[in-house]
Amino acid sequence: GENVEQHPSTLSVQEGDSAVIKCTYSDSASNYFPWYKQELGKRPQLIIDIRSNVGEKKDQRIAVTLNKTAKHFSLHITETQPEDSAVYFCAASQGDYKLSFGAGTTVTVRA
Amino acid sequence: DAGVIQSPRHEVTEMGQEVTLRCKPISGHDYLFWYRQTMMRGLELLIYFNNNVPIDDSGMPEDRFSAKMPNASFSTLKIQPSEPRDSAVYFCASSPRQGGSPLHFGNGTRLTVT
């Protein structure tokens, strides 16, 4: 099955700086890559997703890039704010619904 | 849209007791998923349904776990008998169509088995 690895496990950034989280996947057939944000004690919520026919997608301060050849994808958060502090999960699937999640990255934005 | 509704929010029970977690998916969503989240194992898919039919239960840890979906608006996850290692947050999620659609998670049930 699909194996998703996520790095780093923790990330501390100064407010206003950028944060980058990287994930690799094992199954070259995977074609859907969502990112979820989970605030403390709350449910995971989708923040952005990308499909394998697209190399990059942007939504305001967040962007995701996908490199199918290298089988990795990344989340970029620019101009970080305190409300960006949360756990971020990447995931991958190959068209069925067996989303495989990464282990998560705890992002802390220092004021 | 009320989103995915789970109950109870918190459940504390003693080892050996039966536990039933409940989920109401978003109306019109054909897919329903049960996930378990722990610090050690992260987010694990336990089982998912399509149009009320279980499609893949390979993530169900053992026979003590069972899930049903008697109709399009209700699902249960049952643990009998419960054990301390079952302590986790259990999330239900739903999605409108197959493949490449985002999951909508409920607020989860935090289960503590003493």
Image (tube, rainbow, N blue to C red):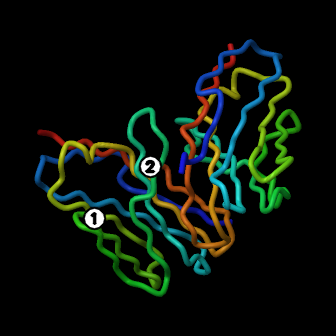
Give the amino acid type for the residue marked by disc 2 in the picture: Gly
Q: Quadrant of the N terminus of chain A?
A: bottom right
Q: Quadrant of the C terminus of chain A?
A: top left
Please report contact status of discs 1 and 2: CB closer than 8 Å, yes or no: no
The residue lying at 29 percent from left, 69 percent from top is: A59
Q: Earlier in the sequence, mark 1 or mark 2?
A: 1
Q: Position of residue B71 (x, y in %)?
A: 83, 50
The residue lying at 59 percent from left, 63 percent from top is: A3
The residue lying at 46 percent from left, 85 percent from top is: A69
Give the amino acid type for the residue marked by disc 1 in the picture: Ile
Give the class, few, some or many, for how many residues have Cα within 10 Å of label 2's Cα (few <14, many ≥20). Answer: many
Chain under disc 2: A
Pointer 1 and pointer 2 on the same chain:
yes
Which numbered mark, 1 or 2, is in the foreground of this view? Answer: 1
Above or below, B20 relative to B97: above
Q: Write down the residue under mark 1.
A: A62
B65 sits to left or right of A7: right
Q: Gap between marks 1 and 2, in whole Å?
A: 17 Å
Q: Position of residue B88 (x, y in %)?
A: 61, 31
Q: Write down the residue under mark 2.
A: A104
The residue lying at 62 percent from left, 61 percent from top is: B95
- Residue in front for this viewpoint, B101 or B73: B73
At mark 1, the secondary structure is strand
Q: Position of residue A77 (x, y in %)?
A: 24, 60
Chain under disc 1: A
